[in-house]
Amino acid sequence: MINAAYDTNNIFAKILRGEIPSHKVYEDDNVLAFMDVMPQAEGHVLVVPKAASRNILDADPATLGTLIATVQRVAIAAQDAFDADGITIMQFNEALAGQSVFHLHFHVIPRKEGVPLKPHSGKMEDGAVLAANAAKIKESLAG
Ligand code: DGP
């Protein structure tokens, strides 16, 4: 439903509150970036604002400004970390459009020549793989 209320118990709100773990790659006062547990390609990152919004439709424009700047930083770092041939950035609004977690987020997905995207919200990745991929992106962000 469009214009539904923000649910403070959505999974990304729990990650932001530290109630469930995530493989973080970047954090500041406004934004958190962490590995998607069901990556559609190696190095798939989610970038979320700390401010509560369900999706882009109810987000404060100021939140979007800081968020997209971080999406760009993470995309450049992920491109470098995985020597990607391209970066797919996706963002879904409401279930009909593919959204399954109702806290605003951007997908940043490194792409390699000849490697198709895996299904959206598909198979869970091994924690050690996610940790190693997070470390690669963090290293690129630091460099
Ligand atoms: P979307 O359809 O855009 O709402 O995609 C939500 C994404 O979140 C999807 O790619 C799978 C991912 N995801 C779901 N649950 C968790 C979780 O508990 N932790 C992490 N890191 N990612 C999750």
Image (cartoon, helix red, strand yellow):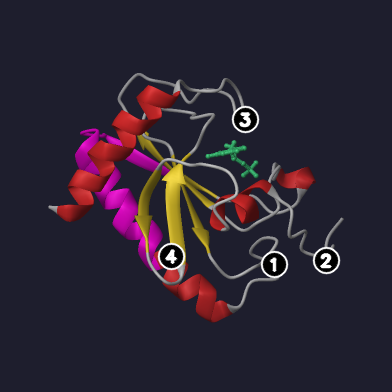
The local crowd at label 1, few if under 14, some if 14 to 19, many if 20 or more residues have their Cα within 10 Å, is few
Q: CA distance from mark 4 to mark 1?
A: 15 Å
Up-down relation of residue 129 to residue 18 (above or below): above
Three-letter amino acid code of the residue under disc 2? Asn
Asked if the residue at tag 1 contacts the one at tag 4, i.e. Cβ–Cβ closer than 8 Å, the answer is no
Q: Main secondary structure of the magenta part?
A: helix
Write down the residue under mark 1. 57
Tell us which disc is closer to us: 3 or 1.
3
Write down the residue under mark 2. 3
Helix, strand or loop under label 4: helix
Three-letter amino acid code of the residue under disc 4? Ile
Write down the residue under mark 4. 68
Residue drawn at the location 42% of the way across and 36% of the way down: 44
Asked if the residue at tag 1 contacts the one at tag 2, i.e. Cβ–Cβ closer than 8 Å, the answer is yes
Query: Does the stretch in magenta take in 73?
Result: yes
Rendering quarter of residue 32: bottom left
Comes first in the chain, label 3 or label 4:
4
Up-down relation of residue 111 to residue 14 (above or below): above
The quadrant of the rendered image in which ligand 1 is seen is: top right
Helix, strand or loop under label 1: loop
For the residue with label 3, is its CB less than 8 Å from the closest atom of ligand 1?
Answer: yes
x and y percent of residue 5 in the render? 82, 65
Comes first in the chain, label 2 or label 4:
2
Three-letter amino acid code of the residue under disc 1? Leu
For the residue with label 2, is its CB less than 8 Å from the closest atom of ligand 1?
Answer: no
Three-letter amino acid code of the residue under disc 3? Ser
Q: CA distance from mark 2 to mark 3?
A: 23 Å
The local crowd at label 3, few if under 14, some if 14 to 19, many if 20 or more residues have their Cα within 10 Å, is some
Residue drawn at the location 63% of the way across and 64% of the way down: 56
- Nearest to the observer: residue 23 or residue 85: 23
**Numbered range of the magenta stretch:** 69-88
